[in-house]
Amino acid sequence: MNILNSKFNTPYSTAPFSDIKDEDFLPAFKIAIENARAEIDAITSNSDTPTFKNTIEALDYSGEELDRISSIFFNLNSAETNDAIQKIAQDVSPLLSEFSNDITLNEALFKRVKAVYDSKSTLDLTIEQTTLLDKKYKGFSRNGANLNDDKKEQLRAIDKESSQLKLKFGEHILAETNAFEMHLTDKSDLSGLPEGAKEAAKQLAESKGKDGWLVTLDYPSYIPFMTYADNRELRKKLSKAFGSKGFNNNDLDNQDIVLRIANLRFQRAKLLGYKTHAHFVLEERMAETPEKVNSFLNELLEKAKPAAKEEFKNLENFAKELDGIDQLQKWDSAYYSEKLKQKLFSLDDEQLKPYFKLENVIDGAFTVAEKLFGLQFEEIDTIDKYHDDVLTYKVTDATGELVSIFYADFFPRAGKRNGAWMTSYKPQMIKGGHNHRPHVSIVCNFTKPTKSKPSLLTFNEVTTLFHEFGHALHGMLANTTYPSLSGTNVFWDFVELPSQILENWCYEEDTLKLFATHYKTDEVIPMELIEKIKASSTFHEGMQTMRQLSFGLLDMAWHGVDTSNIKNVKTYETKAFGDTSLYPDVIENCMSTSFAHIFQGGYSSGYYSYKWAEVLDADAFEYFKDQGIFNKTVADKFKAFVLSQGGTQNPMTLYKKFRGQEPKPEALLRRAGLIK
């Protein structure tokens, strides 16, 4: 019996990672798909009149085994992949796409769903059940259930090709990231770099059997070099390598893939009766339409642009005065921004890092969760993990009841993609009278401990950890009946609220005093540094906002129009960036070819949601600040109406239940220092 197809005989039914072999996955997927198919057949062959319970509920609980295997496999493909797993992913993705289509294009099943949907006014359903019924019906209609047979076949072909292209896109970026190394043997090339970054570069070189120092495109290596290295030519070399991933006209080029994915998405939307892919996606978002998104982005752009231009001019003047730089380039951005920040605030990451030892920051996040939501975190070694770096915790509430199992994976390695994300290995649901608790994971890429130093985080990494932990709390505190409405299964432009609001605590004195202690002396972070963190928090906020808006506008340019006649990715991208560009264009670079959020992840037509959620989080945090950042009443309301409810109701309804009003963008503009 394949271990993946059997009930896990493990503590808390956790994934038995050490017992799973790569070759187990493909046969396991095939068995699980057949089992899920049998569950669907049982629903369609039921001779009883379709009811909410025998059709809608049965459908939501079906495929549990397949979902579990998928979550284990695709999480490994992101955090601990290898050639074998990537090959299996290419084989499995079309099978899953095909099976998904088999469900949404199953006429007998749709007939039963439609029968329940058409009679919903006569049914006595809870709010959650009504939401589930609407979601299931839309799941069919938005995926072609109302199409004729020819069009259904076209849809299947589009979905199959799209799923393979998305995988290939991601594999190309990972391969290009891993292929680049900047090998330095002259110590003077490291001028300006902090000791920790030099030591990490040396350790990396040693691990590859090389003398000197190695710098790569992984964030913990790339960011310090771009921020501190005095050698402008080397910054230029590194920046160009980073910006040209998927754009090198080689076997790993993503230009044709970008055009094809955008085109397939447009074709799919047209097939389903929508004007564009963005119209299709946004129907199920708080923002509702591309017009609303564009007007939201452009309204913020109007407010941010004057500040961004002023900030850019000051940065140019500063670089000219300091080093005689006539034309500021993209590879100068982080370097001179850091220098100017140090001059204005006498603050740099190297001053702060000793106060942000990773273990202390983790404890700090846990303490915040305890103060707000009454959670306890206990590190345990009784559950299996997929890599030695992974930390495992049992999460309980004030009464000692299990809330969640929590995995945390913090360091970069080959086979792990860049960036930071939250994910889940097992969803929360209430089934058979039992509340199944979730297994949640966060994955980051922080600087590893060296021989002489523990892992010390930059302040940006501290906020990243809190951000992903906010997502994790959304998953952990889920308390809904149905798995498809549980945890982070909410509208995309609402999903970032729990993550982004938690970042706010990192700027508060009452929080920092809990965990920001010097790794050598245990001295609590001095008040003057806290003041500087707060004062510098709006530094270059205009430019940062404009950068985020540029990504949102690029996303809408790829998905909110007819893309079938676009011939050149770079030319099209340059045009989309027109209103938001401050730096001269770099001809060898292209953002779209490595824009994984929209071409590999789930953010197509959704990148604006970071800014949208910032409006929500700024407005929500103002409420906390008014009442006290650890105010139990406000925290209880946030837990009751936001964190535990998942996607059971319209997010604006939930937000208003928590806040008592709709969010106001002024809170964000005030926090950003863009209005007084």
Image (spheres, rainbow, N blue to C red):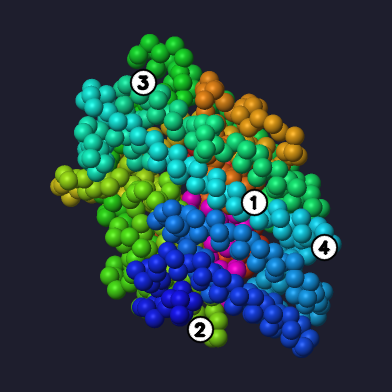
Residue placed under numbered mark 1 in the picture = 162
| Residue at the image point whose x is 27% and y is 70% from the top | 381
Residue placed under numbered mark 2 in the picture = 434
**Label 1, residues with CA under 10 Å away: few <14, some 14-19, many ≥20:** many
Prevailing secondary structure class for the magenta stretch in the rendered image: helix
Estimate the spatial distance between the alpha carbons at disc 4 and disc 1, rounded to whole Å: 20 Å
Residue placed under numbered mark 4 in the picture = 149
Residue placed under numbered mark 3 in the picture = 232
Relative to residue 141, is residue 191 drawn left or right? Answer: left
Whether pointer 4 and pointer 3 mark residues with C-beta atoms closer than 8 Å, the reply is: no
**Label 3, residues with CA under 10 Å away: few <14, some 14-19, many ≥20:** some
**Label 4, residues with CA under 10 Å away: few <14, some 14-19, many ≥20:** few
- Span highlighted in magenta in the image: 481-501
Whether pointer 1 and pointer 3 mark residues with C-beta atoms closer than 8 Å, the reply is: no
Q: Nearer the viewer, residue 483 or 236?
A: 236
Sequence-first disc among 4 and 2: 4
| Residue at the image point whose x is 49% and y is 47% from the top | 171
Q: Amino acid at mark 2?
A: His
Q: Nearer the viewer, residue 422 or 91?
A: 91
Looking at the figure, which quarter contains the N terminus? bottom left
Q: Amino acid at mark 4?
A: Asp
Residue 665 located within the stretch drawn in magenta: no
Callout 3 secondary element: helix
Residue 482 located within the stretch drawn in magenta: yes
